[in-house]
Image (cartoon, rainbow, N blue to C red):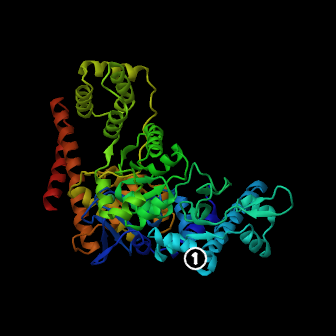
Amino acid sequence: MRDGLLDEFVERVRAESDLLTVVSSYVSMKRKGNRYWGCCPFHHENTPSFSVVPDQGFFYCFGCHAGGNVFKFISLIENVSYFEAVKIQAEKLNIPMPQRKKSEVEIIKDQKIADLQKIHEMAGDFFYNCLMKTSYGIPAKEYLFSRGIHEDIISEFRLGYAPDAWDKLSMAFLKRGIKQEFLVESGLAAQRRNSQGAYDRFRNRVMIPIADERGHVVGFGGRVLGEGQPKYLNSPETVIFNKRRLLFGLDRSHQAIRQAGYAIVVEGYMDAISVYSAGVRNVVASLGTAFTSEQCKKLLRYAPEIYFSYDSDEAGQNATLRALSVVRETGAIVKVLVVPDGKDPDEFIRRHGVDAFRALVKAALPLMEYRMQYVLKHVEHSSLEGKVKALNALLPVLAELRNAVEIHAYVVRIAQVLGIDEGAVRSEMRRFSQHGSSAGEPMRASIRQVVRQKDDAVRRAGRIIIKAAWQDTDVLMHLKSVVPIEQFPNKLHVEILRFLEKQEMCGVLPDDITAAEELSEEAASELSRALVEDSDGQEVTEAYEDSVTSLRKVYLQKLFDEHSQKADELSRGGDSGYKQELAESQRIKDEMDAL
Ligand SMILES: [Zn+2]
């Protein structure tokens, strides 16, 4: 059901949106003539094939054929639905959503979420000001500076300080009219056991705001200053703070993850901040808990590969193995970044610099390789018992490999290093595959492939006609008298022209919103291409005439073939009707020659 209010809303957002501005906030675009070019954010490339024609309001990538209007762009780049994209853009432009009648429960929940977001934002400001503008903050600032975190990074991440006192934040917030129960509910304060009051959860800690993907602060991580315990303390779970789902830093890094094609997952906030600040931006941290399948799925929406860079101490190694077993079932491509001599990424960058870190990223080990090195180092494998144990530790990863050449290479190596027969490795692998656990269907990331589309002069001519008809639907009258829409050789063109015809009959101008709603994905992409593509410097009307002529030729050729074939059949069957068919095909031939 179409909803008038909603349509109006979408149209208003669309009218106030400027595609080029939106695109330019993600991609650097250069002007050439009446169009802009940049490197496509949806597939990896070094020469720009991604284009925007601002007047048309469409983008198109000549490499991966992504195309559409401003909402389509946002939905692809933010990995959200088309309507989510409209809402994101409306939020940016401060256009209020028309309100559907909500149930009582929904209203209460929405209000709760809004209140929680608000109080976290306030707390973020409170901690930031304590760090930067009060004398309590001095030791915390010194600590951060000593770790190489200076004011620019502090303000970029809005780091803060929770003072070494029981109720600084609680008192300040109560004074501002926030109810004590809500303070406790938000996790910023805790109820005193023996009295009515509440006390601050975070005390004498460097505060790290944790945001959701949209950048709303939803919780905090606090690192104690000095020797207190625990070293790291997180906000408790609330409606907006779910540790299994959140990844620290994703609000800043998702573009970079999409562009790089992989995400680097580190263990701690400080690692993520350090790696990001050093210029490696495709980094996130899991929230002090084991890496979860929810987090994995979230990352896979942006890129198909995940690199783990956990600490190289015992605990870090175990965390890596646990993470790997979570990820394996999702079909993600996993690599492991090995940081030498027991360092975490933060320490490593501070000591050796970011280029050395980039070199580690480049040298990240495929899962199987990492597992092999780990097993050979940690499992005694000189005795027969040891060999069996080592092989058993390798089988789960080996059995996941899909590439026969790769499998063969590893089987040979495993046989060699363990000093056993290749055949034995293979039969153990088969046995494991049959009885071992079966992995689920691998999930696919939304990274687009460069696709070579079949394209030729006729298809191009079709697009020129579409462009002309888009600009002025009156063209359709003429077009239909020359080539019936159904006779267009390209099925996508038939779909688009039918859509334009329908708009014309309803007496409305075609627009990108309706096009996005009514056309198939492929047809919408082809339409974008038609509108973004250059007609080799020709005027649209001139290009249109040439194009109609070439499509008329194709059409006539088809008619000619049909009539000739018919004539042939009739004459072979002794039917005199063949003369009429022959005359018709001759007439067609004459017209073709005259074109
Ligand atoms: Zn592309």
Q: Image point 69% across, 64% down: which residue?
A: 114
- Horizontally, residue 447 falls left or right of residue 143, namely left
**Image quadrant occupied by the C terminus:** bottom left
The residue carrying pointer 1 sits among few (fewer than 14), some (14 to 19) or many (20 or more) residues within 10 Å by Cα, namely some
**Image quadrant occupied by the N terminus:** bottom right
Displayed quadrant of residue 23: bottom left
x, y percentage for residue 179? 80, 67
Most foreground residue, 444 or 350 = 350
Question: Circle 1 — which element?
Answer: helix
Label 1 belongs to which residue? 138
Single out the residue that lies furthest toward the left. 593
Residue 201 visible in the shown view: yes
In this picture, is 211 found above or below 158?
above
Amino acid type shown at disc 1: Ile
In this picture, is 427 found above or below 304?
above
- Horizontally, residue 324 falls left or right of residue 162, namely left
Single out the residue that lies furthest toward the front. 227
Residue 478 visible in the shown view: no
* Total marks placed: 1
In this picture, is 562 found above or below 104?
above
Most foreground residue, 231 or 515 = 231
x, y percentage for residue 530? 32, 63
